[in-house]
Amino acid sequence: MTSMDVIVSLCKRRGFVFQSSEIYGGTGSCWDYGPLGVELKNNIKRVWWRDFVQQRDDMVGLDASILMHATVWKASGHVDSFTDPMVDCRECKRRFRADQVDELAWTHYCESTKGNKFTIPAGEACRHCGARRTLCPECGKGQLTAPRQFNLMFRTFMGPVEEDASVTYLRPETAQGIFVNFDNVLQSTRRKLPFGVGQIGKAFRNEITPGNFIFRTREFEQMEIEFFVNPHETIDGRPADEHWHDRWIAECQAWFTRYGLQPDHVKLHEHARDELAHYSKRTVDLLYHFPMGWSELMGIANRTDYDLKQHAKFSGKSLTWFDEERKEHLVPFVIEPSAGVDRALLAFLLDAYREEEVRGEKRVVLRFHPELAPVKIAVLPLLKKRPEIVATGQDLRARLARRWVAIYDDTAAIGRLYRRQDEVGTPYCVTVDVKTVGDLGKGEVGDQRVTIRERDSMQQIRVPIADLESVFARLLGDTPWADVAAAYPSADG
Ligand code: ATP
C-alpha cells in the first residue's frame, strides 16, 4: 500500500498539489492544484460529466450558484442539524470531534486505584472506574469540555450590511441547487420520470478536524447526481427507487474501477439503521482503501421525497411531476450518488503509483488511465545541440497540442526525461533523434520517423511523422498498444 507521505511529496515536487497560502505558513485545511493537478482534476470531472451526463439520455446537467437564498438551508435541515458534536481542550484550546476523541489511546490516572497510571486503549473506558477520556489527546494536560453542537456551514453576509437579515451560507453540498431547480429543469426540458440532474461544483464545510491531505478539507469539490424516479412504479417486481438505487451503486463502482481503482481496494458499506440520516430509506457508501484505512469515497443515498417536499413546504411552490398515465401529481423519490472530486483524485493517484525496478534502478511510475493522465504526449529531443532536432520536436508538439495535452522538454538527458514523464503518468513519449532529421552537412537525409515509447511496457516503435496523429487518435482512443505497435518496427534496445 502506497503511503500518504510518498504521495504528498510527489504531489508537491511535481506540481500536482500545493498547500494553500504556503508562503504564509499554509492552512491545514485547503490545498491548491498545481499545473499537473489541475489537468488531472479537470480530466476526472470531464470523464465523469461525459459518462454520466452527456452520454446518457436520462440525464441533464446544471451549474447552480454557491450562494443561495438562506431559506434553502432552513428547508434542507442544514441550519438546524448539519452539526458535529465537538469538545474543546480547556488548556491548549484545541477542538476535536467528540466521536473522534475516543479513537486514540489515552493516559488515565485512576482515582479508584489510588491514582495508578493506565494507558487506556482507543475507544475503551477504564476497567476500574469506567471513566472515558477526559484529557486532551494533543497536549495531554487540559480537561475536555462536554460535547457541544457545532454547525459546519460557513456563514457569510450577502450585500454591504452585516446584519442578521443578510446572513447566508457557502453551500455545504451541491445537491440543494438541483432540488430548488427541479421545476425549472422539468419545465424547460419536458422530461419524464425517471431522469437525473448532474452537477459538479465547490462545497464548503467548516470541518472540525480536516486532514489526511486532500481527503478532508474545508473547501472541496463534489460531483453529484439527483436521479428522480416514480415511487409508484415497479420494475422487476420492486419499487422503482430500490431498483434504481441498486443500479446506481453498481454503475458508480464500475466507473471507479474502469478508470484505474483496483477492484479489491473498493468495497460497499451498507448504513445500519442507526447510522441512516433521518430522510434516507437506504444509504450505501463506496469505501476506498486509503492509507489511513477504509474510508468513504462517495455515498449513494435514497433520499425519498424528503428534499422536494421540504422545499415545497418552505417556498410554497408545488414541486411535483404529473404522471400522464395515472393522471396524478406526485413527488418523485430521489437517488443521490454523491462523490468528492478531491477524494477521487487521491484514490486514483494512490492506485496509479508504482515503484518498479528496471535494470537495477528504481522507476517511479503513475499508471494512470490515459483519459486521466494530465499530459498525454511528451515530445523529447535526443540531442538538444542539433537545431533541426529541436525545431522538429517543437513543431511536433505544436501539432499534437491541437488535439491532446502535449509538452516539449529538453532540459535533461533522454533517460532522465523518460523517468520524469513516468513519474507523472504520461502514457506516451515521442523522441526525435539524428536519424529523424538526417545530417545535410554529410549529405544524409532524415527518415522522418520518430520513436514512440509506451509508459507501462516501455516498448518502443518507430513511426513516420506523417502517421503520428492517426496513431495517437487510436492509442488515446480505445485501441490497445499491442494492436497499434504490431504495424510498426520495434525500436527497442
Ligand atoms: P464524511 O463522513 O467523510 O464526512 P460525508 O458522509 O459527510 O463524508 P457526504 O455529505 O455524503 O459526505 O458528501 C459526499 C461526498 O463528498 C463524500 O463521499 C466525499 O467524497 C465528499 N466530501 C464530503 N466532505 C468532504 C470534505 N470535507 N473534504 C473532501 N471531500 C468531502
Image: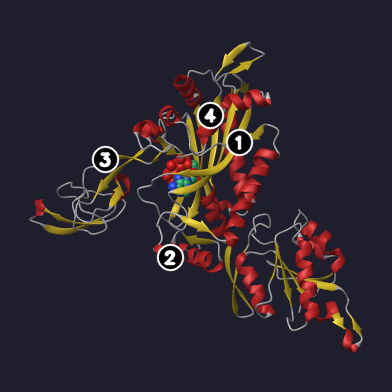
Q: Looking at the image, is mark 2 or mark 1 earlier in the sequence?
A: 2
Q: Quadrant of residue 37?
A: bottom right
Q: Position of residue 177 (x, y in %)?
A: 53, 33
Q: Looking at the image, is mark 3 or mark 2 earlier in the sequence?
A: 2
Q: Looking at the image, is mark 1 or mark 4 earlier in the sequence?
A: 1
Q: Nearer the viewer, mark 2 or mark 4?
A: 2
Q: Disc 2 on helix, strand or loop?
A: helix
Q: Looking at the image, is mark 2 or mark 4 earlier in the sequence?
A: 2
Badge 3 vs badge 4, beta-carbon distance below 8 Å: no
Residue type beneath disc 1: Leu
Q: Looking at the image, which residue sits at the far left? A: 114
Residue type beneath disc 4: Phe
Residue 426 vs 67, above or below: the answer is below
Residue 341 vs 156, above or below: the answer is below
* Residue 179, disc: 4
* Residue 148, disc: 3
Q: Position of residue 407 (x, y in %)?
A: 69, 66
Q: Quadrant of residue 224?
A: top right
Badge 2 vs badge 4, beta-carbon distance below 8 Å: no
Q: Looking at the image, is mark 3 or mark 1 earlier in the sequence?
A: 1
Q: Quadrant of the C terminus?
A: bottom right
Q: Position of residue 491 (x, y in %)?
A: 80, 75
Distance in Å between CA atoms under marks 2 and 4:
40 Å
Distance in Å between CA atoms under marks 3 and 2:
34 Å
* Residue 23, disc: 2
Q: Quadrant of residue 314?
A: top left
Answer left or right for 459 relative to 115: right
Distance in Å between CA atoms under marks 2 and 1:
36 Å
At x 73% / y 58%, what residue is drawn?
A: 404
Give whichever of 31, 419 is nearer the camera: 31
Distance in Å between CA atoms under marks 1 and 4:
11 Å
